[in-house]
Image (cartoon, grey):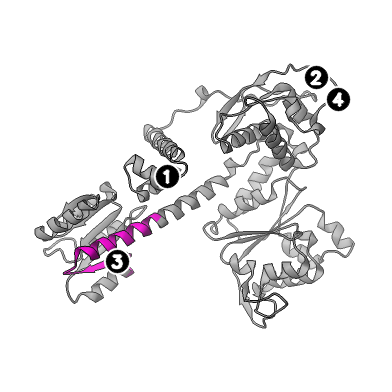
């Protein structure tokens, strides 16, 4: 089902086409006057516009309606109708953004086929736009957990350099979220719609890593049974993230240096270089300066990579963020299992706060995952945590439940946590202190929530959810995108 705006000056044609479309279950809004159609297209928000290019009398033409429709955001799919022998005009309309054209006289089956193709295309475009918005929303700065001063410094740096072309070197221990920041840099840049391609340079031996990064030609080595495009080419127009760059062999360091200098890659077994337009973000969990002194890392490559350096703080350096992270992971684990949010005891929280976290945020997430799997009735207690987190001494805290309160897309502790070191996490303002937004925004949020509930009840099947809601799949995707 789709909302179709039909513009045709011939009343008989309007009647015939409208009957065909309504028989297919579509909502049809007919116009036999170009001026009225041009004025109404923006307010009607149609998903499909079918317009005759020659509207017969003085006033707006079908080409004018095409231009106005394509200027909308998001633009509807436009199918134009031309008279016999007007192929050149149809081609011109296609150049201006028309999806397809019908040439008079046309059969009902042609109309149905064109419309089916248009709706299929619209659903793909809507889904892609929605997924891109989801990715960008997911990696917006305010979606990354961290209010402690060290993380705020990271956010400020990322915000300043995200939309530049500069190479970035992320420094920090394993588990501090370097790839998350790399994605934030990518999705908040002008390259955000292009690929983000990550690779761990320590995960593959030298010859396989070389093939992965630069590609190879058929027969270049044993097992190379076909040409293979490398990750630098896969990331063309976007960003490549080279994690654990310090583990790269001297030979590959030399090849990477050439890519950074010349913006060209040469596949293994090939003698022709290919230009690539790629931003490089590298990460290291060991000091490259020490590797340079030992001869394990090229100094010239270091200076190429270290254009902008962003240090990632360890979790022990940002313990004020621990309550935020704990509640975020608790909510996510509960949502993954379709359960109500978990609660956690104060004694368990004290134990989490007292740990040194050598594995950083990744270790914390694994601890919460274990606890959420082992706990009873959604209440995490001290014994549900990994044994390494069990304190040897007694605690002043009773083993009582700590409530969770929503805060945007994450959650925070409703009660302040006072750990053994005496520091107290800042309490969270209640929802009553939140500003009242515009009614339009509230209604949009309510609609989005209703759509998400329908999708959840349909088991994630968006097509089934669209049927339940009485809208087309394209409309569902468009409403989801508008609700973000």
The answer to whether residue 176 is magenta is no
Q: Is residue 63 visible?
A: no
| In this rendering, the label closer to the viewer, 4 or 1 | 4
Question: Which residue is under mark 3?
Answer: 100
Judged from the image, the secondary structure of the residue bearing numbered disc 4 is: loop
Label 4 crowding class (10 Å Cα cut-off): few <14, some 14-19, many 20+? Answer: few
Label 3 vs 2, first from the N-terminus = 3
Q: Residue at x 56, y 53 (%)?
A: 187
Asked if the residue under mark 1 is in contact with the one under mark 3, i.e. CB atoms within 8 Å, the reply is: no
Q: Secondary structure at mark 1?
A: helix
- Magenta region: which residues? 95-123
Q: Is residue 110 magenta?
A: yes
**Which of disc 1 and disc 4 is earlier in sequence?**
4
Percent from the top left, x then y, of residue 341?
Answer: 58, 29
Q: Secondary structure at mark 2?
A: loop
Q: Is residue 437 above or below residue 395?
A: below
Q: Residue reaching furthest right?
A: 294
x, y percent for residue 467: 34, 44
Alpha carbon distance from label 2 to label 1: 48 Å
Q: Which residue is mark 4?
A: 392
Q: Would residue 11 appear left or right of 69 to someone viewing this image? A: left
Instruction: Report, in whole angstroms, how far the alpha carbon at label 3 lies from the one at label 1.
Output: 26 Å
Which residue is label 2 attached to? 395
In this orientation, which residue lies closer to the viewer: 164 or 346? Answer: 346
| Residue corresponding to mark 1 | 480
Q: Earlier in the sequence, mark 3 or mark 1?
A: 3
The image quadrant of residue 470 is: top left
Q: Quadrant of residue 101 in the image? A: bottom left
Local crowd size for mark 3, using a 10 Å CA cut-off: few (<14), some (14–19), many (≥20): some
């Amino acid at each position: 089902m789709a909302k179709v705006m039909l513009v045709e000056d011939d009343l008989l044609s309007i009647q015939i086409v409208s009957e065909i479309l309504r028989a297919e279950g579509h909502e049809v809004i007919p116009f036999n006057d170009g001026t009225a159609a041009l004025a109404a297209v923006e307010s009607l928000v149609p998903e499909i516009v079918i317009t005759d290019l020659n509207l017969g009398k003085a006033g707006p033409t079908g080409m004018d309606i095409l231009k106005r429709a394509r200027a909308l955001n998001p633009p509807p799919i436009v199918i134009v109708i031309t008279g016999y022998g007007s192929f050149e005009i149809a081609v011109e309309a296609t150049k201006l953004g028309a999806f397809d054209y019908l040439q008079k006289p046309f059969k009902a089956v042609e109309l149905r086929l064109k419309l089916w193709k248009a709706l299929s295309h619209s659903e793909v475009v809507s889904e892609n736009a929605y997924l891109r918005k989801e990715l960008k929303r997911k990696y917006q700065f305010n979606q990354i957990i961290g209010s402690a001063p060290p993380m705020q410094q990271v956010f400020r740096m990322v915000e300043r350099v995200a939309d530049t072309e500069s190479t970035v070197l992320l420094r920090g221990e394993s588990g501090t979220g370097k790839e998350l920041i790399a994605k934030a840099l990518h999705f908040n840049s002008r390259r955000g719609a292009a690929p983000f391609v990550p690779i761990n340079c320590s995960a593959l031996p030298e010859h396989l890593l070389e093939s992965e990064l630069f590609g190879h030609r058929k027969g270049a080595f044993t097992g190379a049974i076909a040409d293979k495009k490398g990750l630098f080419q896969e990331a063309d127009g976007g960003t490549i993230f080279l994690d654990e760059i310090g583990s790269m062999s001297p030979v590959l360091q030399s090849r990477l240096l050439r890519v950074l200098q010349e913006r060209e890659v040469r596949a293994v077994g090939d003698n022709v270089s290919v230009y690539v337009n790629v931003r490089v973000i590298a990460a290291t969990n060991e000091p490259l300066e020490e590797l340079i002194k030992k001869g394990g890392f090229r100094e010239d490559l270091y200076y190429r990579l270290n254009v902008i350096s962003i240090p990632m703080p360890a979790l022990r350096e940002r313990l004020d963020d621990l309550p935020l992270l704990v509640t975020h992971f608790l909510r996510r684990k509960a949502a993954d299992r379709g359960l109500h949010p978990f609660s956690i005891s104060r004694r368990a929280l004290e134990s989490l706060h007292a740990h040194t976290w050598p594995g950083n945020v990744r270790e914390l997430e694994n601890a919460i995952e274990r606890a959420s799997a082992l706990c009873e009735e959604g209440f995490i207690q001290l014994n549900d945590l990994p044994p390494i987190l069990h304190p040897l001494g007694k605690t002043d805290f009773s083993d009582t439940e700590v409530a969770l309160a929503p805060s945007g897309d994450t959650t925070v502790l409703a009660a302040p946590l006072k750990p053994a070191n005496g520091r107290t996490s800042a309490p969270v303002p209640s929802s009553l202190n939140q500003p009242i937004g515009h009614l339009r925004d509230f209604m949009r949020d309510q609609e989005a929530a209703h759509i998400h509930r329908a999708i959840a009840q349909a088991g994630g099947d968006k097509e089934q959810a669209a049927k339940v809601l009485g809208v087309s799949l394209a409309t569902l995707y468009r409403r989801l995108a508008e609700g973000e």
